Amino acid sequence: MRGRVTGVIETLPEHVYGRLASGDADFAVGTRIPPPSLRSRVIGHAYLWAQVPDGHRFAGRDSVTIAELVEEPLITVTTAHRVRQMFDSAVAADGLTYRAAAETESPITAQALAAAGRGVCVLSDDSHYGLRSIPIRARNQDLIITLFGVWEPLHFASAHIEEILTELSDFIGELYPQIWADPAT
């Protein structure tokens, strides 16, 4: 990226666009559909991952089904996260239920708990602590979340922000070309 990022604010998904509207940030990356008053573009897609430590029975797998996953102790983020909402919807659509072994607002805390052997965490974030990320499948397709780049249309640097989000989109496409090219597959 040509410009320099001077600060990053991490917040719950339900507050992302509010922080942008209040002027706390120049642009946002969110998983919820942005309000029409803001400019936005799809910048990528991400898998919903089952993240496990080495040695877990899923560790070498290419994917894991919802039915297999709900039999495990699960570590989830709260329902304020779109990932959790998507996961819960997929579980319900398959007529299944689960009980979370742990629930946290923080994806990094969920990963730490998974790395400590407390269960399988369900996230869209890149893994940490040596965890393996396995795509979650429901109804014969991977669960994939959409990432939106969002900014105020009258921001003085609107054109530059759009360039940054294009570069970020290109980066995401290089990381996950199989889902960026066609997220339905």
Image (cartoon, grey):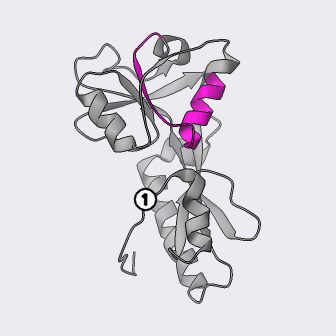
On the image, which quarter does residue 2 sit in? bottom left
Q: Position of residue 140 (x, y in %)?
A: 62, 20
Q: Position of residue 145 (x, y in %)?
A: 58, 42
In the picture, the quarter occupied by the C terminus is top right
Q: Is residue 87 left or right of residue 59?
A: right
Q: Give the secondary structure at mark 1.
A: loop
Q: Name which residue lies at 64% across and 51% down.
A: 32
Q: Name which residue lies at 50% across and 26% down.
A: 136
Q: Say what amino acid the circle numbered 1 marks.
A: Glu
- In the rendered image of this protein, does residue 114 appear above or below residue 175? above
Mark 1 — residue? 10
Q: Is residue 8 left or right of residue 12?
A: left
Residue 89 in the magenta stretch? The answer is: yes
- Magenta-colored span: 71-90
- In the rendered image of this protein, does residue 117 appear above or below residue 108? above
Q: Residues within 10 Å of mark 1 (few under 14, many from 20)?
A: few
Q: Is residue 157 left or right of residue 3?
A: right
Q: Name which residue lies at 37% across and 20% down.
A: 61
Q: How many marks?
A: 1
In the picture, the quarter occupied by the N terminus is bottom left
Q: Name which residue lies at 49% across and 54% down.
A: 173
Residue 103 in the magenta stretch? The answer is: no
- In the rendered image of this protein, does residue 19 appear above or below residue 98? below
Q: Position of residue 141 (x, y in %)?
A: 60, 26
Residue 142 makes an appearance in the image = no
